[in-house]
Image (tube, rainbow, N blue to C red):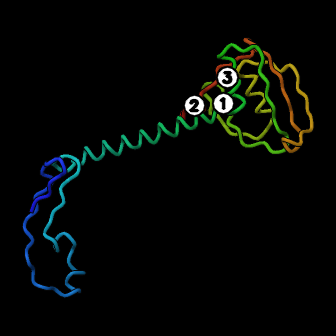
Amino acid sequence: MSAVSQQGQLLARLPHARTEPARSAEAEESSPPASRRGLRLPLLRGGAALSRAARQDRAQARERRKEQGSVEAAREAFFKTPAGRARTAYKRGHQLFQYELAAGEIEPTVVPGRVGSPAHETTDPVDILNSVTAEGWKLVTGKFFSSEMHGGVVGCYLFKRSQKRRQPMNNPWHAGS
C-alpha cells in the first residue's frame, strides 16, 4: 500500500495489512502501543538519535534564549522608569526634562546604582528623584497639584541638563551590575 501526493510524489509506503487473530481487551491494554501495531515511528529530526552532548547543547541554547529574553524585558522596563527616561533624554541632548510623580500610590521603581553597586527597587520618591539627578539633571523646580484624573496629589518636577551632576551609573538589566 502506498500514499501518493496530489503532485504524484510518493509520500509513504506501508506494508500490506495483515490479519491478526482477535485478542482480548486485557491483552491490548497491557501491551505497549508500538508492539501492538508493530510500527516504529521515524525520527523527525535527522536520521540518528541526538547524542547526549547535542541534547545538552540544545538545552544550553534554549537557556541562553530565555535569558536574553528576560534581559531584554528588564532593559525595556528600565527605560520606562524616570531614571531610564532621564538617561534617554540626556543621550538625545535635551536641555530640559519633566517628570510627574503621583504621590498617592508609587509603584516599585528600578533605580540604578553607581557603577560597581547593584540596582534596587524602591517606592521612595526621594530615591526616584535622586536617580534622575544622577543621570545628569539638576532639579529646577517642583510643584504639587491636585488631579482628579491621576486620583490625588501629583508632583511635577522640572530638571535642566547638568554635566557636572552626571555620575557613572550601571545598567540595571545586567545581573552582575
Left or right: where does residue 151 sit relative to residue 175? Answer: right
**Closer to viewer: mark 2 or mark 3:** 3
- Kindly indicate whether the residue at mark 2 contacts the one at mark 1 (C-beta within 8 angstroms): yes
Left or right: where does residue 33 sit relative to residue 92? Answer: left
Mark 1 vs 2, N-terminal side: 1
Amino acid tagged 1:
Pro
Residue positioned 18% across, 52% down in the render? 5
Residue positioned 16% across, 71% down in the render? 37
Q: Mark number for residue 87?
A: 3
Q: CA distance from mark 2 to mark 3?
A: 17 Å
**Closer to viewer: mark 1 or mark 3:** 3
Q: Using the image, determine if residue 175 lies above or below residue 56.
A: above
Amino acid tagged 3:
Arg
The C terminus lies in quadrant: top right
Q: Which residue is mark 1?
A: 112
> For mark 2, does the 10 Å Cα neighbourhood hold few (<14), some (14 to 19), or many (20 or more) residues?
some
Which element type, helix, strand or loop, lies under badge 1? loop
Q: CA distance from mark 1 to mark 3?
A: 11 Å
Q: Which residue is mark 2?
A: 177
Residue positioned 58% across, 33% down in the render? 75
The N terminus lies in quadrant: bottom left
> For mark 1, does the 10 Å Cα neighbourhood hold few (<14), some (14 to 19), or many (20 or more) residues?
many
Mark 2 vs 3, N-terminal side: 3
Left or right: where does residue 140 sit relative to residue 43? Answer: right
